[in-house]
Image: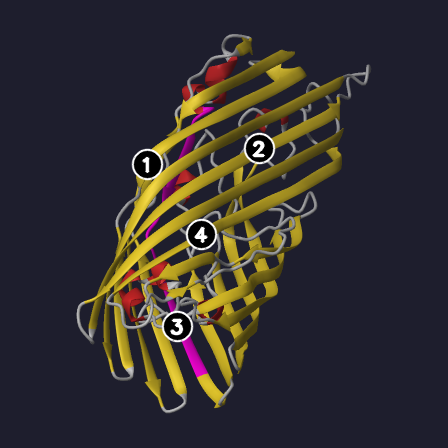
Amino acid sequence: MKKYAWYILLLGSCVENSYCQDSHYATYQFGTRSSLMGGAVIGYARDNTSIFYNPGSLSFVDSNSITITANMYQMERYRIKDANANQKDLSSSQIGSVPLMVGGMLGQGKNRLKIGYGVISPVNFTFSTTSRVSGLFPVVNEAESPGEEEFVGQSNINSRLNEVTGIIGIGFKINEHWGVGYSNMLTGRNQDFNRNTIARYFLNDGNNSLSTFSYGRSASYFHVRYTGKLGVCYRRKRFTAGLAITPPTIGIMGSGIVTADVVGTNVLYEGSRTNILLNDRQEELKVIYKTPFNIAIGSNWNHRRWTFGVSLEFYGRQKTYTVMNAQASGLVLPASFYPNLGGSNFLRQKDGAKSVLNFGLASELIVLRNLNLVCSFRTNRSFYDHGLDQWEGIKTEVTTWNIYHIRAGAIIKQGHSQLCFGFLYAFGSDANRPQTGEYSVPDETQFLKPQTANSKASYSSLGFVLGYSFLLFDL
């Protein structure tokens, strides 16, 4: 007679969200209890989420359950201060929900071999904001246009990044103390990014001549990659410890598009006023996306009514590389215009990542026979590589700040039912965030090559997680 357990997260509807993670590895934690523990379950996750945290502990999972709902609801706010106080700060506030996991498990009870499967969304990022500046500014050289010019400028950034990962993991119990496992992860990644700036100003030349300038680039791609995760788990009485190793990903396929549109009328170019134009679109470009190796260690132990957890995760450095290697082409007038924008680099997208070290701490207290309280703290450091700050081509990262997560909640058990809920708070800041091309200094000599200045950025979020499980034995 076989026993089957199904661990299913039925997903609620998702609304527009803006979760801060285009340069973070650990924004989301998966599962109900594991999420409240802040991912400090590498030693032993107790449920099917072992396929993500440490497949070595999968062989020790004995519970059979159906999880009816498990969603994280969150309100977030970004604020990026203007470097020179000439315009409004960039700000964005979002409310949304994110499903934590959907999955199942085969091979329950005393079986030495366990198979788990699941689908997660490790990246779910949307950022959309617009900044505007208007007024009198010294835009044009005083000899040509005495006094300050009437100026209006606007910049907008739209970025959407999503990943969906399917996981199949196998755990094998060597003996009562040791378990090993391996998870296969296939990830599809979609990114859509565009950035546009416009400038309009009148010359003080007696004719009130109008000059206009617009500058826009976009990148969109789809990529599929494979990742394996090897895990080992040691369990003895009230103590468990785990180690999980994830090598660099292997790219399978990918295709992308880049576009550019730059238009200037009556603008200063190579010493005289003229009209300029660049329009380009390149499709079916080969896409390369890389993630570095990752090593995670952790431990969980019990003491009377308390359970404690600690985890440490290291992500290696990923050297700067080209995601899409577009070549200079398209319609360009005058012919010398492309080199002034950066030549072949103008439409190339680059990426990279610095090494980061994150840690998590968690505790769980049995208050009553049917009530547990859980709290955790976790770091989520940004892997943004500041070596990309002066890159003339396309770079899509918006977030550059480290984030710190605090979570607290409760698990209520009643018969075969288990309700999990908790509150989430996260915060972060960057005192030297690079900010490029928002017209902090309206100067027409910088319109073709926007300058980069440092600004202050802050981030905060408040939310809650809700999950329901029903313990089930399906014979």
Q: Is residue 137 above or below residue 293?
A: above
Q: Are marks 4 and 3 in contact (CB under 8 Å)?
A: no
Q: Quadrant of residue 438?
A: top right
Q: Looking at the picture, how far across and down is residue 14, in whole percent? A: 62, 51
Q: Are marks 2 and 1 in contact (CB under 8 Å)?
A: no
| Closer to the camera in the image, 50 or 391 | 50
Taking the magenta stretch, the answer to whether it contains residue 408 is no
Q: Is residue 20 above or below residue 217?
A: below
**Circle number at residue 42:** none
- Return the residue at label 4: 119
- Return the residue at label 1: 251
Amino acid type at circle 1 is Gly
Amino acid type at circle 2 is Asn
Q: Categorize mark 1 by other alpha carbons within 10 Å: few (<14), some (14-19), many (20+).
A: some
Q: Specify which label sits upstream in the sequence, 2 or 3.
A: 3
Residue at position x 61%, y 13% from top? 276
Give the magenta-colored segment's residue range.
346-364
Taking the magenta stretch, the answer to whether it contains residue 355 is yes
Q: Nearer the viewer, mark 4 or mark 3?
A: 3
- Return the residue at label 2: 194
Q: Looking at the picture, how far across and down is residue 415, in whole percent? A: 52, 82
Q: Secondary structure at mark 3?
A: loop
Q: Categorize mark 3 by other alpha carbons within 10 Å: few (<14), some (14-19), many (20+).
A: some
Amino acid type at circle 4 is Val
In whole angstroms, how far apart are the C-alphas of marks 2 and 3? 47 Å
In whole angstroms, how far apart are the C-alphas of marks 4 and 2? 29 Å
Q: Looking at the picture, how far across and down is residue 468, in whole percent? A: 55, 69
